[in-house]
Amino acid sequence: MASALAEPVEHVGRGWTASLSLANVAIWVGWYGPLQILLARQAEDFAPGTGMSKETLLAWVTGAGAVVSLAANPFFGALSDRTTARWGRRSPWIVAGAAGGALSLLLLAGADGLWTMAAAWCLVQLTLNAAFAAVTAAVPDRVPRLQRGTVGGWLGAAQILGAVVGTGLATAAGGIAAGYAACAVFTLAGVLPYVLRHRDLRLGATDRPPWSARSFVRGFWLSPRRHPDFAWAWLTRFLINLSNALVILYLLYYLRDRLHHDDPEQGVLILTAVNSVTLLATVVVGGAWSDRVGRRKPFVMWSGVLMAAATALLAAWQTWPSAIVVAALLGLGLGVFMSVDFALMTDVLPKALDRGKDLGVINIANSLPQVAAPALAAPIVTHLGGYRVLYGVAAVAGLAGAVLVGRIKGVD
């Protein structure tokens, strides 16, 4: 078996990609079922007894969970980097994280107020990030550089499929508790084919660095001066994800309170489906095309520009038909961005030994927007101009992220 730290050269097969993608779907179901539907419904139930609006309560809960995610992803990534179990360094964390996530979702189903809801959601974030860190690190462990756009495309498709399945389960289950239970079962079952069918890479005796708590903690800081490409890639991902988070956070409330949609939950499902169809049309094709031409930056830059333009359209034209058009355009741009930006990120990783930790640091650029978005969105919606201003701010953030891709020098 190949060394866990060697640069992979053999292309992975379809079975490996399919089972890893299914594991990714399972993890995203555990996140998106609550984020799209269930947490918002619980916030409506609990808000009257707290003195907060449903928007503010939801912002606090999702923000607290995102803070946990900020630390959990790089922490568990670093632990998986140094795991020496005979089952490998990634698989044990995938199983433990998915099992813990399923149990945490069941705890969330039984929440009876703000504090139990927040605590359970934080546990969901903690455990599922352990699994997600390990799943993500498996790609640079096993996939050669010029196949990562394609594999990243399938993982991107898995993410949006997880959003659709999670939203569908949460909507169709018939209640909040049933929705959480359905998401919990899917989350645990979906990771099993990968860990049961594919042998993980193990660290060799010479690969294991001496353990030091001080060096472990200090390793989470990556100097922007020493690794400028890594820093610019992180910032561009943060800004584009912040734009996307601002669009998604209050989608249910936007449809209900601004557009006065007859069935806002069904509306969320329709927009998610439209977005998913157009995303799936570009996510694998964009990644494969990037592999074929050997370039990453133009794909990331122009997909970011398209998403920023679509978000600006949502700010200017606030109707149900416009929401459908914007969902379609965002899907087209996000599909290319998800696959190619993931490949770009793996191209700027500093050290093979720290792939899991460094990808965890990069994934902070996915989680931090979940903290920043509620902090920005709640006052904008309630006091500073409403949804029109909110989506204008989101468009500016996304455009800034697209432009700054040009600062990355070591990747074409």
Image (spheres, rainbow, N blue to C red):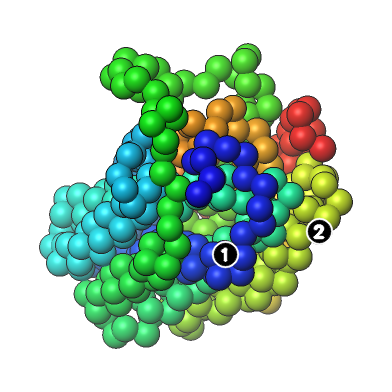
Q: Is residue 405 above or below residue 330?
A: above
Please state the horizontal and vertical placement of residue 283, each as a whole percent of the image.
Answer: 69, 63
Q: Amino acid at mark 2?
A: Trp
Q: Is residue 199 above or below residue 110?
A: above
**In this picture, residue 315 sits left or right of residue 125:** right
Q: Residue at x 62, y 15 (%)?
A: 226
Q: Which residue is mark 2?
A: 289
Q: Residue at x 43, y 27 (%)?
A: 206
**In this picture, residue 347 sits left or right of residue 89:** right
Q: Is residue 205 above or below residue 105?
A: above
Instruction: Name the quadrant containing residue 121.
Output: bottom left
The 10 Å Cα crowd at callout 2, few under 14, some 14 to 19, many 20 or more, is some
Question: In the rendered structure, which disc, 2 or 1, sits on the residue that comes first in sequence?
Answer: 1
Q: Which residue is mark 1?
A: 17
Q: Quadrant of the C terminus?
A: top right
Q: Is residue 139 above or below residue 254?
A: above
Pick the residue in front: 42 or 32.
32
